[in-house]
């Protein structure tokens, strides 16, 4: 095991620090500072000689999974409405930040003080309507300024001479500001990335006028998927999923004659796939693109309504999981696994599962 030398304060070239505004500290602030100092000292002790073997083995890379896990555990605790659990999980996340800072300090990269000074200066810099002379009449103006300031920061970080656009959208001569969208990590999950991209664009005024426009876009994307399926489906493939759209009268009569003995699937069929139902043909590249456009439009609906699409989808996932597991439990109580029940019985159980959660009754399929 690699031994670490006693902790030293990293020294690195530093630019001129921005002047800190005079903000009075109260007893709460001072007490928080004392406890934070104890946490930093504790983690440094665990990494030091005769510390914890596990802590001494960790690297930035090995800790990545814990940073992600702790973030999601904070979100779960937030939904639990348990203040003690919420505080505890926030503490676990704070430990990860402290841990990474201690590791960086050991290599001379930065210290926890640099981390705190960085976010403090950033918050002052991005609130010129509080700590400078900039005016912001409402939160929309604040967000617009925020994105413009971030663009300038990114340009400066890349060695450019970027300046925030003027109110009329013009730039100073020779200025090369970074894109408003440059800071959105491409490694984000697709739903979250779409949310961040459209949210930033909306902050500077590039947005839909109303919700009706987004719904029209959803309908347009659905029609394009239908058209892609109809044009790409091989004529010989009779097992392709039937598209739910209006058919000419003659076609409806022919289809009825061929399937008169079959039971028509209920609305809940989208939630239960029969074992005998053939899987759809893998989507071609253009079809995958159309599906992506549909999902992108759906993300815009959530954002426009002020809902986080990632959280909204997570809640829908939990709702489906809860109802489906209730169905499984009832089926087992009847002496059979859910998979052995008829489709009709599955539908009955699905409808009953919704009655177990009255507050969700309005969100039926």
Image (tube, rainbow, N blue to C red):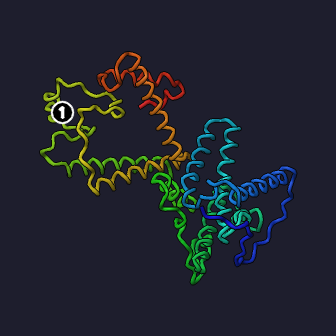
Residue 332 image point, x, y percent: 39, 20
Q: Is residue 292 placed above or below 147 in the rendered structure? A: above
Quadrant assignment, res 252: top left
Residue 102 image point, x, y percent: 68, 62
The furthest residue to the bottom: 174
Residue drawn at x 44%, y 48% as measured from the top left: 298
Residue sitting nearer the eye, 335 or 363: 335
Residue 46 image point, x, y percent: 70, 55
Residue under label 1, please give it.
252
The quadrant the N terminus occupies is bottom right
Residue sitting nearer the eye, 180 or 191: 191
Residue 175 image point, x, y percent: 58, 80
Residue sitting nearer the eye, 46 or 161: 46
Q: Is residue 91 left or right of residue 283?
A: right
Quadrant assignment, res 123: bottom right
The quadrant the C terminus occupies is top left
């Amino acid at each position: 095991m690699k031994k670490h030398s006693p902790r030293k304060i990293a020294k690195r070239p530093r630019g001129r620090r921005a002047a800190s505004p005079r903000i009075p500290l109260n007893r709460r602030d001072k007490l928080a500072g004392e406890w934070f100092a104890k946490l930093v000292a504790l983690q440094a002790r665990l990494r030091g000689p005769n510390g914890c073997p596990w802590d001494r083995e960790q690297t930035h890379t090995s800790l990545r999974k814990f940073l992600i896990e702790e973030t999601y555990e904070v979100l779960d605790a937030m939904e639990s409405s348990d203040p003690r659990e919420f505080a505890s999980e926030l503490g676990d996340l704070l430990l990860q930040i402290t841990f990474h800072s201690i590791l960086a300090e050991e290599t001379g990269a930065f210290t926890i003080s640099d981390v705190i000074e960085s976010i403090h200066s950033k918050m002052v810099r991005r609130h010129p309507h509080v700590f400078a002379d900039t005016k912001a009449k409402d939160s929309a103006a604040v967000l617009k300024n925020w994105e413009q300031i971030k663009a300038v920061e990114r340009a400066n970080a890349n060695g450019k001479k970027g300046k925030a656009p003027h109110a009329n959208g013009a730039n100073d001569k020779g200025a090369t500001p970074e894109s408003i969208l440059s800071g959105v990590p491409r490694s984000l999950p697709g739903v979250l990335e779409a949310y961040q991209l459209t949210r930033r664009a909306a902050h500077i005024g590039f947005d839909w006028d109303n919700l009706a426009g987004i719904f029209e876009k959803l309908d347009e994307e659905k029609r394009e998927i239908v058209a892609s399926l109809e044009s790409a489906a091989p004529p010989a493939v009779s097992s392709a999923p039937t598209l739910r759209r209006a058919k000419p009268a003659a076609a409806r009569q022919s289809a009825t004659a061929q399937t008169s003995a079959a039971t028509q699937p209920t609305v809940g069929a989208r939630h239960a796939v029969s074992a005998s139902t053939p899987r759809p043909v893998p989507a071609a590249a253009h079809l995958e693109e159309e599906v992506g456009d549909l999902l992108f439009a759906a993300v815009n609906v959530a954002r426009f309504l002020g809902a986080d699409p990632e959280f909204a989808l997570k809640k829908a996932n939990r709702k489906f999981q809860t109802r489906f597991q209730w169905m499984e439990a009832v089926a087992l109580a009847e002496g059979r696994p859910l998979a052995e029940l008829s489709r009709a019985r599955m539908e009955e159980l699905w409808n009953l599962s919704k009655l177990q959660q009255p507050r969700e009754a309005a969100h039926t399929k």
